[in-house]
Image: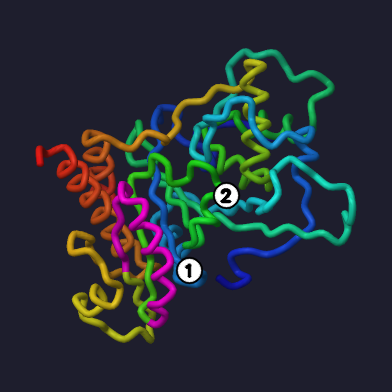
Amino acid sequence: MTEGDYRDQPLRPYVLTSGRAQPSRNWIGVDTLLVAAPGADPLPVTASRQEIALLRLCGGLLSVAEAAAHLALPVSVVKVLASDLMDSGRLQTRSRAAERPDAALLEEVLSGLRDLG
Amino acid sequence: MDSATSADRRYLPDTVQRSVKILVLGSFGVGKTTLIGSVSEIPPLHTEEVMSDAGVGVDDLTGISRKTRTTVALDFGRITLNRRIALYLYGAPGQQRFWDLWEGLAEGALGVLVLVDTRRLEDAFDVLDQLERLERLPYVVAVNHFPDSLAHPVEELREALDLPPHVPVVDCVAPDRSTSLTALTTLTDHAMRVLAARKAPS
């Protein structure tokens, strides 16, 4: 390891999540796919800038890690924010790659990769 | 103002229902992000996580300006394989204590591509050591050839890395899309064999 993969910086991300480090839905992972729920109520005026930005970004389908990268927020913070937005019915999730792929899925991945070659 | 349209390449097609992931592990400078970038449909994305020894969420209010925390980088890319499936490639530092930061990153992964630089073979030992402990995770060793790499016979590398005989070794040139794809198909093929062998009656 050299400094290219990590560095030190003063950063206090949990301020953004009202001090919480764990999302209320603890199965949300880096690869959970997020998309805004159609026809949901608008966010209350008390919503944080980060919540607003996340919900807006989720106008299309993308993963938690992608949302974190686009918003320049740590994944752990996006998980908490996404979890809150799901609790209030504004965000939907689609997939979590927590299940090891079965033979049929592996076959599909293999054929997809071969099509690219 | 962000608006979601199919033309916005940040987004997956709305038909995608399932994400699959492969971890690309290796030491710094071994070419993880280059390999990911060579096959990804989006420019590789970058996110960082804060590493803290103390319980996360517990924040001391002393020494705010002096205290620093270590952040660890995760670079990743994406391939939409078909209407239904998106494959994510996560490049992370080799040591498990770093990729453990992204809770569940290895959980449910299709497998691991261990990227190795023959000029610094010893860097791969740590990664391989911990993969042996995660025995259920299929992995393939991809040897990234740099312009000044010496050509080593596969058997020599296998011996130097003390690899079990069933672990495939593939050659790649990380910036080259076709060799990166070959590494990924080799891993997927290997994962299928591992799964089949596990299911077969012993």
- Rendered residue at 64%/18% (across/down): A87
The residue type indicated by label 1 comes to Ser
- Rendered residue at 55%/54% (across/down): B74
Residue B148: image quadrant is bottom left
Q: Which segment did they paint magenta?
A: B119-142
Residue B186: image quadrant is bottom left
- In the rendered image, residue B120 lying in the magenta stretch gets the answer yes
Query: Is residue B144 in view?
Result: yes
The residue type indicated by label 2 comes to Leu
Q: Nearer the viewer, mark 2 or mark 1?
A: 2
Position of B98 with respect to A87 (left or right) is left
Q: How is the image coloured?
A: rainbow
Residue in front for this viewpoint, B160 or A100: B160
Q: Which residue is mark 1?
A: B27
The numbered mark 2 sits on a residue in which chain? B
Q: Are marks 2 and 1 on the same chain?
A: yes
Residue B111, percent from left and from top: 33, 49
- In the rendered image, residue A24 lying in the magenta stretch gets the answer no
Q: Which residue is mark 2?
A: B101
Residue A86 in the image: above or below residue B151? above
CB under 8 Å between callouts 2 and 1?
A: no
The numbered mark 1 sits on a residue in which chain? B
Position of B169 with respect to A96 (left or right) is left
Residue B65, percent from left and from top: 88, 58
Which image quarter is the C terminus of chain A in? bottom left
Residue A63, percent from left and from top: 52, 37
Residue in front for this viewpoint, A108 or B135: B135
Q: Secondary structure at mark 2?
A: loop
Gap in angstroms between the C-alphas marked 2 and 1: 16 Å
